[in-house]
Amino acid sequence: MAGTTSGDGTVGKALEVLDQVAAYGKPVRFSDLLEASPFPKATLYRFVQTLTNQGMLSYDSERHTYALGVRLVRLAHAAWQQSSLAPIARPYVDALAHDVGETVHLAQLDHAQVLYVDKRNATTPIEMFSSAGKVGPAYCTGVGKAMLAYMDGPDLTSILDQQSYHRFTETTLASAEELRSELRDIRENGYGFDREEHEPGIICVALPILSDGGRAIGALSVTSSTDRQTLAGLERLVPRITEATTAIARDAQDWRFPDKQRHTANAGTK
Amino acid sequence: MAGTTSGDGTVGKALEVLDQVAAYGKPVRFSDLLEASPFPKATLYRFVQTLTNQGMLSYDSERHTYALGVRLVRLAHAAWQQSSLAPIARPYVDALAHDVGETVHLAQLDHAQVLYVDKRNATTPIEMFSSAGKVGPAYCTGVGKAMLAYMDGPDLTSILDQQSYHRFTETTLASAEELRSELRDIRENGYGFDREEHEPGIICVALPILSDGGRAIGALSVTSSTDRQTLAGLERLVPRITEATTAIARDAQDWRFPDKQRHTANAGTK
DNA sequence: AAATGAGTTCCATTATTTGAAACTCGGTTT
DNA sequence: AAACCGAGTTTCAAATAATGGAACTCATTT
C-alpha cells in the first residue's frame, strides 16, 4: 500500500524522480524538484544524490542544476540494439525508403502507445532521437492500427480502453467500436491506411510485422501527403512493403532467438 | 564498505542489474542473469520484477527472456533534449558537415570516456543510435583530447588514471605523461589532432566547445582518412570549425540557462 | 548585522530489503 | 506411471537500509 504512483519500493520511487526530471524538460534545481515531489527534502536529496552517483542524472555544479545523465543514453543505445527491431530492420527500411521515395516509419507497441523506433525520410537526411523514441497515439496512426489489428481478447480490450479517442480531424476514428470494425478490415486485407486521421493532409499505408506466432511485433508505414499521393497510390506500394515486413520478421526470428527455433509452419516461401 | 561495484544502496544494485542485461546484448533468461550476478536468486528475482514493472526491462513471456525496456528509450529521448548538446548543435553541425564534406562528430565527456552524441556524414545519410550513444576512449581520440585539454587538477588526474592506454596504433599516446604534454599543446593552439592514434589511416582535427567559464562542455571534430586528407588540410578547416564551436557554446549558454545570464565577454562577433 | 532561503547533514525510528529454504510446475528420465 | 529434475516463484524471520523531522551551513538579501 502507500501507493504514490508506482508502488515498487525504493527503486520505483527513485525512477519516479527520473521521470520528474525528464518531465521538467530542462536542467532543474533541487528546490524546483522538491516542490513537485511527494518526498520530503532529505529523502529527495538522497535520491538525487544516488541517481547522480549512478550517472542517471548529471549535476551541473556551476548552476546547481540536475539533468538526465548520460548513462541513460548508453543504456538506451543498448535497449535499441537488443529490444527494438531497428537494428534488424535497418537495411530493409533503407532499401524501402530508397525505392518508394517517401517517409518510412518503423514502430513498435509500448503498452497502449506507438513508439517510433526508426524513421527514414527520402529528402531530409537525419533526425536522430527526435524521431526515434517519440511516442504517438495507437488509435489514429497507420502503424498503431496495423499492430492492434493482430491483437484480440482482453489484451486488445485493455489497450482500446486506454485510448483517448481525441478527434484530431474529421476522419479520426473516435470510438472503440469504430476502431474495432476498422481493425477487422485491416486484418482481412493485411494492411491499413491512415486517412488523414491524425493530421489533415497526411496519409499513410501501414503493414504489421508478424512473428511466426501471428503476433504483431512491429509495423512499417509509408507516409505521404495528399498533395503528392493518393490512397490508391500508396496501396500500389503494398507488395513492396510486404517484402520488407516479411524479411524483417524472418530476421527477427533468427536473430533474437537463434537457439530455440519454433515449429516454423510457414517456411520456404521463396 | 561492502562494495560490490556501486555501493549506492538498493537503487544502485537495481541499476547494476540493468547494466548486466545491457551487457548481455540480447534477450536474457533469468538463469543466465543469475549466473553472472552477485545476488542470490530471490534477490535478483525481485529486482528483475521491479524493473519489469517499471518498464526498465521488458519480459517476453513466450521465450521467458528479459530485455531492456522501452521506458529507457523514452527517458533517453528526454536526456538527449535536455542534457546533450545535440539539439542545440544540430543546425551548426549540419552546416559544418555540408561545408567541409567530411564526417563530423559531436561528443561529450562521460566520466573518463568520450560519448558521441551526434554524427554527420556527408556521404552516408544516417546512422541513428549506432553512432549516438556510442562511447570511445578519451586518450586517443581527437574529441577526447580536445576536452581533456581544458581540464586540470585532481579531476584531470583522476580521468587520466582511468585510461587504459592500449596502444591501438604506432602513434597512440600510451601513457599519462605523453598525453599531458599533448594536452598542453592542444590548449595552447585551441585545437588538436588525431594522428591515426586510434585507427590506422583515420585522422581528425578536433576543437573543444567551451563554456563561458572555460570548461569544455563538448567537442567537435572533422574526421577523414589519410587517403583523402592531410593534417595540414584538416588544419585549414579550423577557422570554419571554430565558427561552429563558438556558435554552439553561445547557444548552449542561452538555452540551458536562459535566466541567469553571464558576463558575456565575447559577444557580437557577427 | 540580522534574516532569509537553498542546500546539506544527523540520527533514532521504522519500514524495506534480504536470502536460505521450501515450494510449484513443466518436462524428462527411469 | 512414478520419480526426478531444474527453472522459476514464494515465504518469513532477521538484518539492513530508507526515512524524515530537525538542526546546521553558507551565501545572498534586507
Image (spheres, coloured by chain):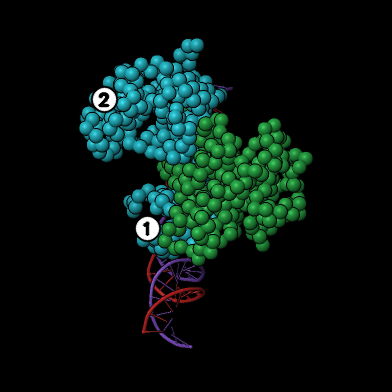
Chain colours: A green, B cyan, C red, D purple
Which mark identifies residue A240?
none
**Residue at image mark 2:** B182
* Residue ID at (71%, 47%): A164
Number of numbered tags placed on the structure image: 2
Give the percent coordinates (x, y) of residue B149.
32, 25
Give the percent coordinates (x, y) of residue A201.
71, 35
Q: Vertical placement of B234 versus B128: above or below?
A: above
Residue B59 in the figure: left or right of residue B188? right
Q: CA distance from mark 1 to mark 2?
A: 41 Å
Residue A68 in the figure: left or right of residue A235? left
The chain letter for the residue carrying disc 1 is B
Which mark identifies residue B37?
1
Q: Vertical placement of A233 versus B62: above or below?
A: above
Kindly tell me whether residue A245 is visible in this rendering.
yes
Q: Residues within 10 Å of mark 2 (few under 14, many from 20)?
A: some
Q: Residues within 10 Å of mark 1 (few under 14, many from 20)?
A: some
The chain letter for the residue carrying disc 2 is B
Mark 1 or 2: in front is 2
Amino acid of disc 1: Ser
- Tell which of B219 and D29 is nearer to you: B219
* Residue ID at (36%, 61%): B35
Q: Are labels 1 and 2 on one chain?
A: yes
Q: Quadrant of residue B120?
A: top left
Kindly tell me whether residue B204 is visible in this rendering.
no
Give the percent coordinates (x, y) of residue B263.
48, 16
For this orientation, the residue located farthest to the right is: A170
Marks 1/2 in contact by CB < 8 Å: the verdict is no
Secondary structure at numbered mark 2: helix
Secondary structure at numbered mark 1: loop
